Image (cartoon, rainbow, N blue to C red):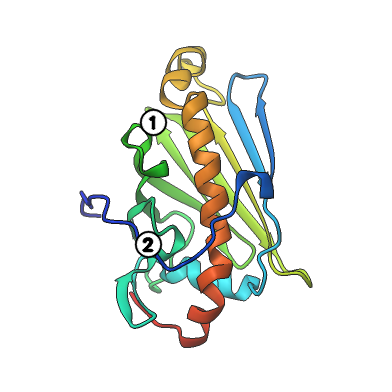
Amino acid sequence: MASLVKRLVDPYDFGWTFRAVEDCDVVETQLGDGRFEIRLDHAPLRGVTTEMLAWWFQVFDGTATYRDQSLPAYHLWHPRDHVAVQFTRDQAGQVAPKQTVHIQEVFGRDKRFSTDARAVIHRWDGRGVGFHLDVAGHRMLELDHVFKDSPDGAIYQSCLRAGAAGGPLRGIINGLVLPRRFGAAQRVAWIKHNVEEVGCFENFLPELFQTKAIMV
């Protein structure tokens, strides 16, 4: 996988209203081993189905045609904070477990909260997606999204765990490194970003799913 090395572009203005953190049920916990866990139960995504989400998670590294404009599909998912994304695919051309994802984003367009991470996918199917980041044999981050259909729209839940669950450096990582790399301000910025990002689905995904207007 080649490096992306992209930059934050001017934000798109589609006239959307972004969801507020207050629209989401957020539970933040420090686990007994020192890791941070953040769980978000998002309000139902009106007009969105799990079929749409499963399609999106196979193609959102492509180029979308939306409202007569060609742009990276990833920028639709968050028109302000997203920079670039890149996947590897299996022999069938699918994004799947054991493949990798490279993500670049800037929470709140604040360079203090820039993310440039390469992670391994451990789940990617019609009911959820997830990936993890390992450093020096330690699991440093896990992010999982699960979704299901409901009469009010797709129910979408996110869970982030940051820090080392085990290994000889767990105490140092969770006690010293984690507060610096994923401190309170970073966590607040990520929560806001995630709430806005997930909420954007109901603004564009039902329309885009009808045309399938993404070239990968």
Where residue 19 appears, as percent x and y from the top left, is 59, 54
Q: Is residue 24 visible?
A: no
- Compared with 19, 188 (above or below) is above
Q: Dot 1 lies on which element?
A: strand
- Distance of mark 1 from mark 2, alpha carbons? 28 Å
> Badge 2 local density, few (<14 within 10 Å), some, or many (20+)?
many
**Which comes before the other along the chain, label 1 or label 2?**
2
In which quadrant of the rendered view does residue 12 lie?
bottom left
* Residue plotted at (48% across, 19% down): 179
* Residue plotted at (50% across, 65% down): 16
Amino acid bearing label 1: Val
- Residue tagged by mark 2? 75
In which quadrant of the rendered view does residue 150 lie?
bottom right
* Residue plotted at (37% across, 70% down): 91
Where residue 34 appears, as percent x and y from the top left, is 59, 19
The total of numbered circles placed on residues is 2
Front position in the image: 42 or 126? 42
- Residue tagged by mark 1? 135
Quarter of the figure that contains the N terminus? bottom left
Amino acid bearing label 2: His
Q: Nearer the viewer, mark 1 or mark 2?
A: 2
Q: Are marks 1 and 2 in contact (CB under 8 Å)?
A: no
- Compared with 90, 212 (above or below) is below
Front position in the image: 14 or 161? 14
Where residue 180 appears, as percent x and y from the top left, is 42, 19
- Compared with 207, 162 (above or below) is above
Front position in the image: 132 or 39? 39
